[in-house]
Amino acid sequence: MYKIVKKETLGPDLHLYEIEVPRIARSRQCGQFVMVRAFDHSERLPLTVAQTNPEAGTISLIVQTVGKSTLEMSSLQAGQFFQDVAGPMGQPSHLGYYGTVVVIGGGLGTAVVYPQAIALRELGNKIISIIGARSEKLLILKEQLAAVSDQLIMITDDGSSGKKGFVTDALQELLDAPETDVDAVYTAGPVVMMKAVSEVTRAGAIPTQVSLNPIMVDGTGMCGGCRVSVGGVPKFACVDGPEFDGHQVNFDELMDRLTTYKSHEARSLDDFKRHACKLQ
């Protein structure tokens, strides 16, 4: 059992949980994730570690309520406990000194690129952060990223904050600006967004790291659910990733695999809501 020491609402259906897990807090490296179960009957969810506090022995997770399991998780409050928090899992981020690095977070993907921005800055890189969401209410970690970035660009679909448009529009503007040399890109978010970012950087052969979010059951490579094709070679995102060269990822295959259980997920959510209504 792992105690929730803090729960904070970041936006509509967006919550930050700070959890006591001293061993993970001490050993986790940038880019790694944990597998979480809210209750003993819950499914395991892979969640990126957004922040760690080794002194306090805590990690922070940002969770968006989108399905049955995350809705169930949202019922837990500070002072209560998660059943399981296993990790750290996956490979650490591939970090180095490049010069100018653009980190791009779409929606919840901002929680992935935030620790990358910190680590890349500590290595001496200039950091330009681009974060995007459907609306201002869904933009997260704005102040935190601003504090570790040389420049922060905010993009919303509806223009309610920052520029209206897509993160790829802002990236292309940077690449076209004669005064800016982009030496590497790190991105996380919706698969279609990561694919678009990778296509923008492909022409200039700019190294591009993407953090993938395929279906994942156990996080140890045993189930094979998180299989992705990278450079024509099968990889397991849980043990070989979650980060890969964006120019080598077969995004179309990944997007197709993500729809495999869509109808099952919808039915599970509907059943859960009906059951919850009957108990009220």
Image (cartoon, rainbow, N blue to C red):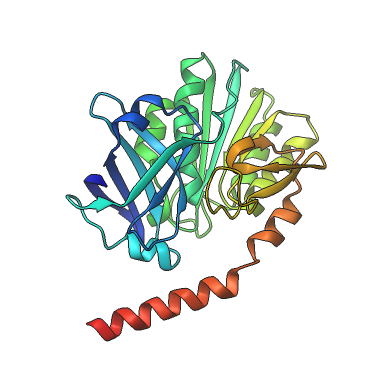
Residue 171 spot, x, y in % from top left: 63, 38
222 w.r.t. 55: above or below: below
Q: Residue furthest bottom?
A: 278
Question: In the shown orientation, is residue 240 left or right of residue 70?
Answer: right
Residue located at (45% from left, 31% from top): 115
180 w.r.t. 228: above or below: above
Q: Is residue 88 in sight in this rendering?
A: yes
223 w.r.t. 177: above or below: below
Picture quadrant where residue 95 is located: top right
Residue located at (65% from left, 66% from top): 260
Question: In the shown orientation, is residue 156 left or right of residue 242?
Answer: left
Query: Viewer-proximal residue, 217 or 188?
Result: 217
Query: Viewer-proximal residue, 202 or 248?
Result: 248
Residue 1 spot, x, y in % from top left: 27, 47
Residue 232 spot, x, y in % from top left: 82, 42
Picture quadrant where residue 24 is located: top left
Q: Is residue 182 in sight in this rendering?
A: no
Residue located at (68% from left, 58% from top): 255
Q: Residue furthest left?
A: 79
Picture quadrant where residue 229 is located: top right
**Number of callouts in the render?**
0
Q: Which quarter of the image is occupied by the C terminus?
A: bottom left
Question: In the shown orientation, is residue 48 left or right of residue 102?
Answer: left
Residue 117 spot, x, y in % from top left: 48, 28
